[in-house]
Amino acid sequence: MPTGGPTGGLVLRRAIRGQRRRVIAASLLGMTHQGCEALVPVVIGATIDTAVATGSSSALLRLLIVLAVLFLVLSTCYRTSARIGEGTGELAAHTLRLDLAARVLDPRGGADANRLPGALTSIATNDARRVGSVATVISYGVSAVAALVISAVALLDISVPLGLLVLLGILPLLWLGHRISRPLERRSETEQEHAAHASGVAADLVSGLRVLKGMGAESAAVARYRTTSQDSLSAALRAARSRAGHEGAILALTGVFIAVIGVVGAYLAMDGSISVGDLVAAVGLAQFLLGPFQLLTYVNAELAQGRASAKRIAEVLASPVTVEAGHDVPADRAAGHVALRGVSLGALRGVDLDLPAGSLTGVVARDPAAANDLLLCLAREADPAEGAIELDGTPLTSLDPDALRRVVLVAHHDADLFESTLLDNVRAGVGAAAGDGPASVERALQASAADDVARLLPDGGDTLLAERGRSLSGGQRQRVALARALAADRPVLVLHDPTTAVDTVTESRIAARLREVRRDRTTILVTTSPALLAVTDRVVVLEDGAVRAAGHHTKLLAADATYRAAVLA
């Protein structure tokens, strides 16, 4: 974890501090409830000594009224405290989910590094819920400790030895409970890690189900998930055994402690040091103490699991960013002049490119890794290891990533659609940059041939698409994704293989319309499609990570055998 990043303890403290008022309110109500419940055996003992033993009806009536008031107060406080406490946990978990979402969506990136989407979802749901539960159980723990203190004071009033026995025994029991919870904390962390990984693998397999079926790889996928699921199950069973052992050990300790209190109370009664009513009160308090001790056992277990989950949340929140945030903001009406000066990153080796404002440039990279690294640099999802990329003369590293992406849009080949209507998907990127809203959407639909897709759907553009657009064919999804990128109408648009699943007739129509709709806007096509490359002003060829050739598509086809093989294969 990076130095200075949030730790698990800090995440827990923030979750509790953010709900401080509610925690205090729930704790005060809980203390009142436990205090009234602890006084019940004391009042019953007093009833035996002052009313039953003396036969006083008035004293009996008064004490019965006191009992009724105690039960009324404790039941009201319990319900109110429980409602506030549960709400506190939900609010704390919600706040954590917002923090996690903000970190994952941070334009500087980094939170999703080496984490499957399903794993991040598990952290934002299960782990956030467990940490939120800590905010709930804090009031339970405070209430339980208050009950122990009130019981000890009551026992001191009955008998000093009994009171001291409770007071002196509480701290060792709490210390032992904390020590016993350590294995549960470790195993809970492992359990959550395996569960998150299993969720990530499951989501990954479901998203690629159609591909797996097409390859006939279902059995391999099932075997992979079965192994992951078994690992998760084993970790969950180890955590369950640890929790059972933890609760059993605490219950045994508290049982012995309460039995000792009962034995000492019986001895003092036989010795005449306390009355029969005092003995009844002492035994009642001893039995009552089982509740607070069990509550502390539950609190200990929740704290152990909450600490483990807080560590996992802290790891995401403290993830190092992929790119540093710049302070400059590009103009909304940026000209769109893009220049690469000796850019090296991954498969790229000293790439020099000058892409004038308003130009339509094709980039052919036979190595997919080089194409991917180029896209990462242009989107500023990664900064070059060497060299620089400039937008209108300003280095991208000095620009705020979020503001940059409002000017430069990189539409990746594997862009997903949302579970919404077709039109909502296309309008997703339309903002101030698009200017004319509905008109830009209509132009984008026509340019991408997505209007043909809409006409084939039951409710046209208002048809609800399935998750990731799975209700559409591959070519239809590509056209809708392309329409979304065009509708955004950014000054600089980078498209990566936008028509690989589209038939040749439609692709040619898209190519012709693309040039028109992107007139006077800088457009970069990273593709090997001859139909798209034919409408570009210039084509740049990357080979071995460096610029090997540049020129018009038709001239390169005639003069360069390597280029010809790449685009006509």
Image: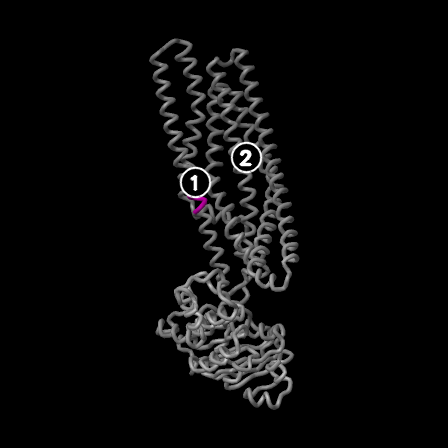
In the picture, the disc for residue 470 is none
Q: Position of residue 519 (x, y in %)?
A: 43, 82
Question: Which picture quadrant has residue 38?
Answer: top left
User: In what element is the residue under mark 2?
Assistant: helix
Amino acid beneath label 2: Thr
* Earlier-in-chain disc, 1 versus 2: 1
Amino acid beneath label 1: Gly
Q: Main secondary structure of the magenta part?
A: helix
Which residue is pictured at 42% across the width and 62% down the height?
A: 464
Magenta stretch, residue numbers:
84-90
Q: Position of residue 148 (x, y in %)?
A: 49, 29
Which residue does the numbered mark 2 point to in the structure image? Answer: 297
**Residue 75 in sight from this viewpoint:** yes
Q: Is 325 or 76 nearer to us in this picture?
A: 76
Which residue does the numbered mark 1 point to in the structure image? Answer: 85
Q: Is 396 or 210 nearer to us in this picture?
A: 210
Instruction: Give left or right: position of 182 versus 432.
Output: right
Q: Position of residue 224 (x, y in %)?
A: 65, 55
